[in-house]
Each structure stands twice: as structure tokens, then as C-alpha cells.
Image (cartoon, rainbow, N blue to C red):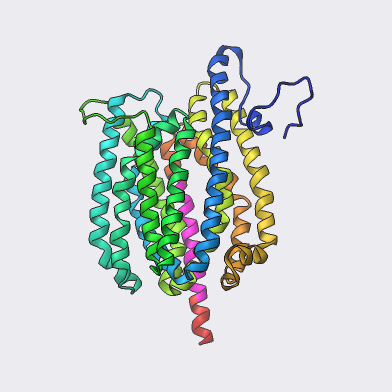
Amino acid sequence: MSSIPPPSSPRPGPLGDLGKKLVPQTNSNAQVDVADLKRKSVRGGAVTMLAQACSIIVHLVSTLVLARLLSPDDYGVVAMVLAVTGFAGLFRDLGLSSAAIQKKDLTHAQQSNLFWLNIAMGVFLTLIVSAASPLVGLFYQKPELVSVTCAMSASFIIGAVGTQHGALLVRKMQFGRQAIANISGAIVTLLVAITFSLQGYSYWSLVWGSLAGAFVTTCLLYLLSPFSPGRPSKGSGIRGMLQFGANITGFEFVNYFHRNLDNILIGRFWGPDALGLYTEAYRLLMLPISAIRAPINTVAFPALSRLLEHPEAYRSYYRRVTAVVAFLSMPLCALLFATSRPAIEFLLGKQWLGVAPIFSWLAVTGFIQPVAGLRGLVMLSNQHGKAYLYWGIFNAIFVSIGFGGFNFEVQESDVKVS
């Protein structure tokens, strides 16, 4: 970490030393491009961090209010459905937003075709998930999940409309407009959820809040983005982008299982109350971690993609991103581990103290996960889609074995006790 600049040094930008850490120095023959990238990185980092701070405030208010209006069972019901819609949602984007961001020369015809592919997949997934809703209720043995699943399936169509508009904002590093859309959607989600919960709609408060927020976010992305989709056309040259997106989708497919297998097993064998405690502990831990990682990743991905022709600058940028993420996330996770019980009691209330032990153990994993997760930036920005997929398969296999083995031991121990 660099020290505070001496008086003779130039004044730091909006991010102070953080902005300097995320911007590498390079040779003079690339000075014009890197100077422009520096300005956009520092400005974009400042905007995304400010937006993330606003998002944290909204989520904290949501936690403080809704946790006192709703029960763990209400959260568990929605978590069961999200485990299903989250899996289907892997195919809504098809990795095409990342392909659009990473593409060196992106034409309007190419992005228009990607837009219509996203729309087609959104409609398809809505129909498929709605048709499969009875199976969801049967699997969890809760009939009320059928109507909840049908309602939540509408999110695929809603989200598909704004996918390429959001991707172009990131590609052009216009993070301010993206922040307006995301924060507005989060505020609407909160207001709608609180309004419905006060009227006694229990878990439906979370469902309608989520759909309303997604709709507002999509509308604003569509209005604020410079992208205006044209008609589908042939011969636009998107085959390579589809292959790149397919590798990302493959990674997300296998990654889903080890990220959600725990939710599925807990919901199936211990019920919605236990699942509600677990998912709330996980959500609370990921809130500050995401607040650190998300804005840095958002800025770093398009920046690293543009530095491929400057290896030294690329390496310098990545080292500084890693240092910043580690410096911010590791002490935070250590603090959360040490103060889990009072933190849970303050944020959620005494009725949620069962979350505290789970929260502590998750904080141990969170100590290293944000830094380890940066490997995806390197693979994707270097167009190594297959390596990204293979790593996901390797990681998912071993994590799933761990979940399955632990579940077997717990079930066996319950049988012995009984």
C-alpha cells in the first residue's frame, strides 16, 4: 500500500489513494489510452462506490424493518423459489452481456441481435418455469410455492429487456447512469415490500417488492442507455460472442450447484424456518463483501479488457485491485466473526439470534473468498472462456462433495440420537 503523497505530489482524485492503486502506469506509447482509462476508472470507481454505499443503506433499512415484520418462514418460502428461479436465470443472459462488454469492436447490429436473443430466452424461461411450478411445490411439499413460482417467473422477461442496455453502460464505463437505475430499483423494492408487509401479505411482500424493483431498474436502464435496438439481422458476426457466452453460461451452470446446493438440502430436510435463518446469515455477510467487491469488479472488468495489449500495465492493474480488495475485505470479515452475536441482535432482533453461529462460520470463508474470486476477472478479460468453465467444474465438484458429505453425517447423527 502506498503512503500519503507528499505536498509536492499531485492531489489525489475522487477516490484518493484508492484511485491511484487501481490505475497502473505504463510506457509513453500507450499514454493517451491509459490516461483516458485512468480518468474513467477513478471516476467510475468513485461513482460505483457511492452507489454501493447507497445500496447498503437501502438494504440495511430493509433488514431492520422487514426482519421485524416478517418471519424466518416467510424468508424461507421465497428462498425455496429463488433456488429454482436462480437456476433458470443462468440461461437468461447466456453470457452475452459479458461478451458485449469484453468485445473489442462491437457493432450496433451485433448488439441488436444479442438483445433479441436475450428477449427470446426471457420469454422461454418464463413459460418453462411457470409450467414447472407444480413440481416445485411437490418437491418441497408446500403447495403455496406453485403460485409464488409463477409470479417470480415474470422476472425473466423483465430482466431480459434491459440486459444489453446495462451491458453497454458498463462497456462505456457510464457507471453513473447504471447506478441511478440500480438504486432506484432497490428503493422501489424496499417501499413495495414494506407496504405489502404492513398489510399482512407475509412472503408475498418480498415477491411483489422484487418484481416491482426489477421493473423499475429495467425501465431506467432502457431509458438511460444510448443503445436503441434494431431489427434482427443475418451475418453480423456474433458466433464468436455466442461461444464466449456459452462458456460463461456453462460456468454459471456448474457454479449454481455448489452455491445453491446448501439451500436446496436445508430446505428439503430442515424446512423453511432453518433455511430462512441460513439465507439471512449468508445475505448479511455478503452485503458488506459485495459492497467492496462489486464496484471494484465492475470497473476492473472493462478496464482489464482494454489493457490486453499492454501486459505490464495489465499486471500492475490486477495486483493493485487485489491489494485493495484484500485490504478492505479481510479486516471486515475478521470483525464480523468476532462480533456476530451483537451484530445479529442489533440488525435483526433477538428472535434471529439463531443466525449468529452460522454467521460466524460463514465469516471464516468470507475472509479469503473475495480475493480468490478475482481469478474470474483474469480469465474473462483474457478471453479464456474455456479455462473459466473448467475451473468452475473443478470447484463445483469438490464443494458439492463437501455439502453432500456433511448432510449425510448430520442425517446419520440424527438417526442415532432418535
In percent of the image, x 45 and y 37: which residue is there? 178
Residue 121 within the magenta-colored segment of the rendering: no
Q: Is residue 394 left or right of residue 223?
A: right
**Image position of 180 with respect to 395: above or below:** above
Q: Is residue 2 left or right of residue 129?
A: right
Q: Furthest-bottom residue in view?
A: 418
In percent of the image, x 43 and y 74: which residue is there? 269
Q: Is residue 230 left or right of residue 407?
A: left
Across and down, in percent, residue 3 comes to 76, 32
In percent of the image, x 69 and y 56: which residue is there? 335
In percent of the image, x 45 and y 41: which residue is there? 388
Whether residue 58 can be seen here:
yes
Quarter that holds the N terminus:
top right
Judging depth in this view, the residue of 369 and 417 nearest the camera is: 369
**Image position of 97 with respect to 331: above or below:** above
Which residue range is magenta in the image?
392-410
Q: Furthest-top residue in view?
A: 29
In the rendered image, which quarter is residue 264 located in?
bottom left
In the rendered image, which quarter is residue 365 located in?
bottom right
Across and down, in percent, residue 88 comes to 33, 53
Across and down, in percent, residue 306 comes to 49, 25
**Image position of 3 with respect to 67: above or below:** above
